[in-house]
Amino acid sequence: MERRLEVDPWRIVETGFDAAAGPDCMASESLFSIGNGAMGGRANFEEFFGGRTLQGNYIGGIFYPDKTRVGWWKNGYPEYFAKVLNSAFWPGIDIYVGEERLDLSICRIEAFRRELDMRRGVLSRTFTAVLPNGVKVGVKVRRIVSMAEPELGALSYELTLLSESGAEVSVTAFVEGDVRNEDANYDEKFWEPVALDRESGALTMRTKKTGFEVRWTQRTAVKAAGRPVSGRNVSENERIAERFVCTLKTGETVALDKFVGVASSLNHPEAELAAAAESVAQRAWAAGFEAVLAAHEQAWAEKWAGCDVVIEGDEAAQQGIRFCIFQLLQTYTGRDSRLNVGPKGFTGEKYGGSTYWDTEAYCLPFYLCTSGEEVARQLLRYRYRQLPQAIGNAAKLGFKDGAALYPMVTMTGEECHNEWEITFEEIHRNGAIAYAIYNFCRYTGKRDYLAEGGLEVLVGIARFWAQRATFSEPKGQYVILGVTGPNEYENNVDNNWYTNYLAAWCLRYASEAAEYVAAQYPDDYRRIVAATGLNAAGDEFARWREVADGMFLPEWTLEDGETVFLQQEGYMDKEQRMAADIPAEQRPINQHWSWDRILRSCFIKQADVLQGLYFFQEAFGGETIARHFDFYEPRTVHESSLSPCVHSILASLTGRAARAYELYLRTARLDLDDYNREVHEGLHITSMAGSWLSVVEGFGGIRVGRDGRLHVVPRLPEKWRSLAFELHYRGAILRFGLGTGEVRVVSVNGRPAEVVVGERCYRVDDRGIQVKVG
Ligand code: BGC
């Protein structure tokens, strides 16, 4: 494969730049994105760029309810689609050399290097360019979104004159508030100006409809040839701007440090916004860029501790997994339980909203293992806070008595996805939310969260399933009709195995959880019963168990006499073809076939039955998983970024090593190698958690077993000499070193933990263990 970016274990590196390569320029803007959990943005150039670009700076939790655009309105459709907002362009620097504006789309570029240092979280760029007027300049930029100060963006911009004669250079540092979303449904502008405060170099904007206010305060320090230069305030309209003009001789440099404080009404009372943004910018300015950078790097070092993955023998895989970890760490920090992990994080607009089932199904285990229990708990709390809205969503669709349907896409808990086949039918998402609670309890070995918030969520979800399932007289069983499974290439199907299985599981789990809380946390239980009316009208648990035990789970007997769980009723009536037979020029089918043709085909977008087997692998065992993998995977086109990772794990688990590795590369380097030619729109953040799972659960074979203990069963790809990773586990930080025939585990923080290797359970402490494996 020809790679546009260099392979390097800790860096993403681009050398050379072609302004005419439109989508590639935009792809780089996505790939080099930086953020700190609270805000972040695409790697747009600081200076003006006349080529193709998607400007993007996003602030967590700040959104706009864009009016829905559908062809034919149906009752129950959400009124709006929450858009993640492109906000003021804070890194702006406008450069003129003489009369000529520095714009890489019209310069001759002699050297160009862009680098994302994933260890330190620093985006840098160096280039040498000849402007159309013949003047040659060398530029070096370093930019961060501070991990140490969630409301701070900072950069250092140095321009050196390389031409033989001197020139006048004007450098304008600006923050531009007049920005738009490309994905606006009606070309509307989502922001309105509140105040441009020229004296304090600050701008306040307000979002329309949602009324969020954000204040940006800019502070700058400029030196030309080592001497301070004072600037002129040229702010106007929705732009804070300060211009510095100097005359440079050959070899001299003008250096600008810029600090922008970004404070929003999500975190501050409106009356205090100005002071908050000012204080962040002012403190950073007083400390200087190098000190701000050092604090940021220190914060990144702390983030990496306990979550690195080291692969020996495969640099491309190494870079791929670090990129995934880096992106996930900068998208969500767990500092704020109102935030979540958007499928595009802070790297693009597409998908809107911030929260999909991706969070529970894929991201939560990543944060739980790499960032610790508290961070993961924040994700659970997010859904707990939104329970009233989930009950509201269900009520809108006709469900009652506290049944909760969590949304497919949301910012506030309200559903904002508006394709009926997803909004109304892709209800399996409710199950993933219950599963995440179970997964959290299983991994931490603690069930206190059930009393804190989990049980209330489970009760709402169980009530939904108990009402959504209906009794079929001919079958004598409960059925769930008219759904969309995880495979979105089929809609309105009856008895999707995954949905039915998950629903039955949720019903049982909710009643077990209730019994547990009643016994262990009687005070909480009383509070929950009072709040939810649990069992007020008879024995709800009995009803839940009846539906669960009577749930219809479709199966099919294959020609060889073996049975498989059937994706949904009628699936085998379709013409059975294999994905490998689709001509390459017709892939991906979602870009080449009509939607009608896709729906009629047997092709599967992403793991569906296999998603269920992955979640509940202990209940099924290797042989069953292998049989289903061999049946479903060849029919799967993997056209969701969430697909290859689950399949890679199951392939590892069932000894299909080569396929596991192929699918792993496809997931871990999906964006770096731009497999689907769509990286210009942003990165696939949530599937990056899946990539991590394919390393740790797939190749590392880490899993909490039926016995409630942590097991490790290494299955390294042939090419890998060794695999090492760290996990937060029940208070310990465990470092695993897996090589051929050997497992080493040590507790890095000295806290002991139990780990099962082979058949034996070991107590691991700071002296570690080393065990031979077959
Ligand atoms: C997938 C969904 C997923 C969404 C956001 C879709 O393409 O089919 O399962 O939730 O993307 O990642």
Image (cartoon, helix red, strand yellow):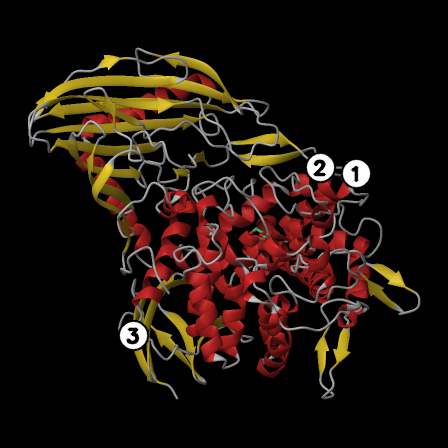
Relative placement, left or right, of 513 versus 652 is right
Measured as percent of width and height from the top left, residue 373 is found at 45, 55
Q: Which of the marked residues, 3 or 1, is nearer the chain's N terminus?
A: 1
Amino acid of disc 2: Val
Q: Residues within 10 Å of mark 1 (few under 14, many from 20)?
A: few
Q: Residues within 10 Å of mark 2 (few under 14, many from 20)?
A: few
Q: Can I make out residue 770 in this image?
A: yes
Circle 1: element type = loop
In the rendered view, would you say 326 is above or below 198? below
Of labels 3 and 1, the one closer to you:
1
Q: Quadrant of the N terminus?
A: bottom left
Measured as percent of width and height from the top left, residue 182 is found at 51, 33
Q: Residue at x 30, y 56 (%)?
A: 305
Tags 2 and 3 touching, CB below 8 Å: no
Q: Residues within 10 Å of mark 3 (few under 14, many from 20)?
A: some
Question: What residue sits right under mark 3 in the picture?
Answer: 768
Tags 2 and 1 touching, CB below 8 Å: yes
Give the number of the disc on residue 169: none
Question: What residue sits right under mark 2 in the picture?
Answer: 70
Amino acid of disc 1: Lys
Relative placement, left or right, of 256 versus 494 is left
Circle 2: element type = loop
Q: Quadrant of residue 745?
A: bottom left
Relative placement, left or right, of 674 versus 557 is left
Q: Which of the marked residues, 2 or 3, is nearer the chain's N terminus?
A: 2
